[in-house]
Image (cartoon, rainbow, N blue to C red):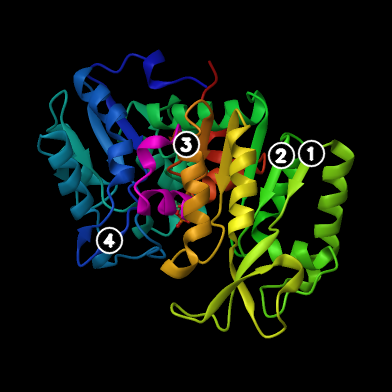
Amino acid sequence: KKSVRDVDVKGKRVFVRVDFNVPMKDGQVTDDTRIRAALPTIQYLIEQGAKVILASHLGRPKGQVVEEMRLTAAGNRLSELLGKPVRKADEAYGESVKAEIAKMENGDVLLLENVRFYPGETKNDPELAKAFAELADLFVNDAFGSAHRAHASTEGIAHYLPAVSGFLMEKELNVLGGALENPKRPFTAIIGGAKVKDKIGVIENLLEKVDNLIIGGGLAYTFVKAQGYEIGQSLLEEDKIELAKQFMEKAKAKGVNFYMPIDAVVAKEFAENAESKVVDIKEIPADWQALDIGPKTEELYRDVVQKSATVIWNGPMGVFEFDKFAHGTKAVAESLAEATDAITIIGGGDSAAAVEKFHLAEKMTHISTGGGASLEFMEGKVLPGVAALNDK
Ligand code: 3PG
């Protein structure tokens, strides 16, 4: 895809879609990772003398104005990070916005209001897409985290303006895409999370590509059950047992080493301070439930990671929100952090949150800013926000 580097931006009005869908509390941004991730593109455009018009969604306001979902706080944080004023518009298109833009000098930055305050955004209404396009000479999509959405500001607008990727978008596609298409081997994927249902597409696609597939988290127990073991009160998706069997057979047929927990931390109930103990995977007691992988499993997974050249990780190994059941997730995060010669990629969402929580972010090759987007990318899907961009 063409990137912002490939076009002339000086003096141009540039509509940049960013993903400032950041966690907020009491009107403040509590995690500015996504804002910081957008800085290289914004700074480049400022230096090049473009008029930088930023657009984002925040939350799911369902096509109406929701005061707590204004982008004002995100704009203030951006201004602090840039060390320069960022004007904030009260709307995302129309005459008032055009008037603001007419006043801009080269290198100025204007942040539009939440694009999801308008019903046309999520419907990808061409009229709204055109209204966005009218504001600018060029569209830059840097919102990898929203690239799986075919919305007016992510996909629609690209039909009405020259459309290129920003640096964050480019980096996400290069790192994730490079690992999936041309990995340094051995290539290992670690898939966790609560449900098989949410990871079917990812497991299916990765089985075609990896040398090792490791599973953990709640979804693992449907696989344990499929192996014929009792899992007590652990999470079970009855209707996915057959699929789990098929995945394991496919792994075997393809020569993919398939790893699942060999022991578990089981608890009497699903609670922060529940009574717990470590058991062999074949001995989960009937009235207990597995909430984390056990120490032998941690060892096993660490060994596999140590022998890998590329590791992609998506989804926690246990209920890491509860400290008592965070050990397995932390161990996996640490084993990736220790694998300094390997390419280590965190596929967004909960695993990214876990890596942050354990202060290991600096040790990873790449932490995706996409949750749903990186998941869909790993499923091998074409992201509409990417597909709409101009080719080189
Ligand atoms: C995300 O946080 O995954 C993106 O910003 C997309 O948000 P959405 O799921 O509300 O479309």
Give yes or no for residue 356 being in the magenta stretch: yes
Above or below 10: residue 81: below
Identify residue for label 3.
338
Q: Is residue 383 visible?
A: no
Q: Is residue 354 above or below residue 106?
A: below
- Quick one: label 2 or label 1, which is nearer the N terminus? 2
Identified by mark 3, the residue type is Glu
Tell me the quadrant of ligand 1.
bottom left
Among the two numbered marks 1 and 4 on one chain, the one whose residue lies closer to the N terminus? 4
Other-residue count near label 4 (Cα within 10 Å), few / some / many at <14 / 14–19 / ≥20 = some
Instruction: Indicate the quadrant where residue 167 lies.
Output: top left
Q: How many angstroms separate mark 3 from mark 2 (CA)?
A: 18 Å
Extreme-bottom residue of the structure: 287
Image: magenta residue range: 349-365
Question: Looking at the picture, which amino acid does disc 4 mark?
Answer: Met
Q: Do callouts 2 and 1 mark residues in contact (Cβ within 8 Å)? A: yes
Q: Give me the residue at 65% from left, 37% from top.
A: 188
| 346 sits left or right of 199 in the view | left
Residue in the picture at 81% in, 70% down = 229
Which label sits in the foreground, 3 or 4?
3
Label 3 CB-ligand 1 distance < 8 A: no
Tag 2: amino acid: Asn
Mark 2 vs mark 1, CA separation in Å: 6 Å
Check disc 1 and report the residue beneath it: 256
Q: Observer-nearest residue: 260 or 118?
A: 260
- Badge 4 marks a residue whose secondary structure is strand
Q: Nearer the viewer, residue 331 or 91?
A: 331
Marks 4 and 1: in contact by CB < 8 Å?
A: no
Q: Secondary structure at mark 2?
A: strand
Numbered label attached to residue 12: none
Q: Residues within 10 Å of mark 2 (few under 14, many from 20)?
A: many
Report which residue position mark 2 lands on: 212
